[in-house]
Image: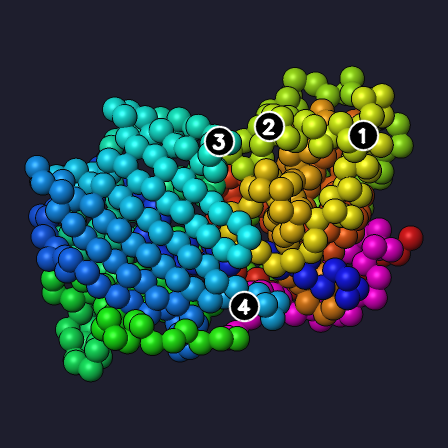
Amino acid sequence: MAKIKWNIVWGTVITMVFLGLLAVRLELFKEKPEDNPVRQKVEISRSPESWMNIYQNKKKIGVIHRKFNTLGNGRFQTEESVTMQINTMGVVQALNLSTETELNPDMSFSSFNIELNSSLFRFIARGHVSKDKLILYTGLPPAEEKTILPIKDIPHISGNIYEAAFSAGLEKDKTRDFSIFDPSTLGIRKISVTRNADEIILSMGKRVLTQKFCADFMGAKNCAWLAKDGEVLKETGILGLSMEKVSAEQAREGIATGGVDFTQIASIPSNRNIANPSKLTGIEIKIDGIHNSALLIQGGRQKFHQDILTITKEPYPYVASEKNITAVFQKYLQSSPLVQSHAPQMKTQVEKIVFHTDSPQIKLQKIVQWVYRTVEKKPVLSVPNALEVLKNKQGDCNEHAVLTAALLRAAGIPTQIENGLVYLNGRFYYHAWNLAYIGQWVTADAVFNQIPADVTHIRLARGEGGEQLDLLGVMGKIKLEVISTKND
C-alpha cells in the first residue's frame, strides 16, 4: 500500500475549498432580478490597495494582495494576487493565483484573466462578454479550448460576493440569491447571501462596527464582516479556513510551513478496518449528512434507501463490441476544455498503447494499466488538464482520471469521470476515477489499476464540469458507518 500512499490526494478538493472560501474572487455572478426586488444601491469606497492574510486554524498559510484601478470613462480594473502554502498528505506545496478583471461603469463584467500555478501545473482561463454570450478560453496556448455560454443578463463581478450584497443594499435578516460562474468547471450555480445582525469585531487592533453577511454555497457556509465603507475585514469558511485584513508589513511576514493536512481533515474515519477492499463484491454503509444535497448517490451499482447505501461490484463483461456504442453515448466521446481527447498528442499516444483491432475491453485494460504504470503518483494542486498530465506524467487521482478519460475517448471508448470517496488505511478519502462503456458501464481506477473499481469507491458526483461543486456542500458533514461487507 505504500506505493499508492499519495493516490488519495485530491487536488481538486483543495482547489474547490479555496474557491469556496474566496467565493467570487474568481467567479462571475449575475443577479436574478425576478427573485429580488430593486433596492437602493450603496457605494463602496474601495481602497486602491489592500492585503489579507489567509489562515487555517489560526495558522497563516497565505496572503492576498488586491488592487482597484480607474481606467477612465467610468470603467475599472481589479487585480488580485494570492499566494498559499498548502499541506496535502505531508507535502507542502505553493499555490499562486492571479486574476485581472475589467468592469463597466455599472460594475458589470467586461473581461477577465485567471492564471493558477502550482509546482508542476498551470491553469489559464480568460473570457469576455459579447452581447448575450460569454466567450471563454481555457488551457495553455496553442491548445486553448474555446467555449461559448449563452447568458440572459450581462454578468457582474466583484472582489467578493459579500461586497456585492453590501452594494445592493441588502437589509438585515434578508436573503438574496446570485448565480456564480466557476471558470475551472464552467459550472453555474446559485449562492444565497443573508445579512445577519451587525457585530463589533477587532480588526487591526481596533474595535469596528461591521455588517455581517453569510453565504450558503451548495450547503457550504461562509461568513464575512464588512466595514461601513463596504471593505471586507474578515472572512471565515469551511475546514478552518479564514481571512483577515492586515497591513502591508503584516502581509510580508512569513507563511507557516507544515500546517494541517487538508486531505486528512477532509477525510472521514471508518468504524471498521477493511483488510482487502479489492476482494469485496459488496458493501453496506450507513451515510449521514447528505440530506437535501444534489449528490448522485443513487444509480448504477449503487442503491440508496433510508440512509443505507449498498454498492455491488458490477460484473466485468468479457465480451464487448464497439457496435454496442449507440448514439446515446457519443457525447462521452467528445473532447472538452480539460479532457482534450481530440488533441493530436492524445491520438498519437493511444496508437502506441492499443491496436485498432483490440476489443473495447482490451483497450480499456491497456489504457488503465498504461496510466497506472506511467503517471507518477504525486499530490498536485491545480485544475487537472489531460494534455499537461500527458506531458508531465505526474499527479494525483484527478490527473489520473482526466488523462484516462482523454485516452479512452481517443480510443473510441465512451468515458466519464466520477468523484466521491474511497477507503484506505482506516479512513475514507476524497477521490476521482472513471466510468467507461464497453458494452455496459464499468468503473475503472487508474490509480489502483482496478477494473471494476473496488466497492469502497462511493460515488457522490459524476461529470467534469460544475457537478463537482456539489461536493462542497457535504465536506465536513458526511458520516459513514460500514454495516457489512460481502466477499468473493
Colouring convention used in this rendered image of the protein: rainbow
Kindly identify which residue carries mark 1: 354
Q: Position of residue 99 (x, y in %)?
A: 33, 49
Mark 3 or 4, which is nearer the eye?
3
**At numbered mark 1, what does the secondary structure look like: helix, strand or loop?**
loop
Q: Position of residue 364 (x, y in %)?
A: 78, 35
Q: Residue visible at 16% across and 80% down?
A: 207
- Using the rendered image of the protein, determine whether residue 304 is visible from the camera's viewpoint: no
Q: CA distance from mark 2 to mark 1?
A: 17 Å
Kindly identify which residue carries mark 4: 92
- Using the rendered image of the protein, determine whether residue 119 is visible from the camera's viewpoint: yes
Q: Residue visible at 64% across and 22% down?
A: 330
N-terminal of the pair, mark 2 or mark 4, is: 4
Residue numbers of the magenta segment: 259-287
User: Relative to 233, does residue 128 appear above or below in the rendering?
Assistant: above
N-terminal of the pair, mark 4 or mark 1, is: 4
Kindly identify which residue carries mark 3: 142
Q: Residues within 10 Å of mark 4 (few under 14, many from 20)?
A: some
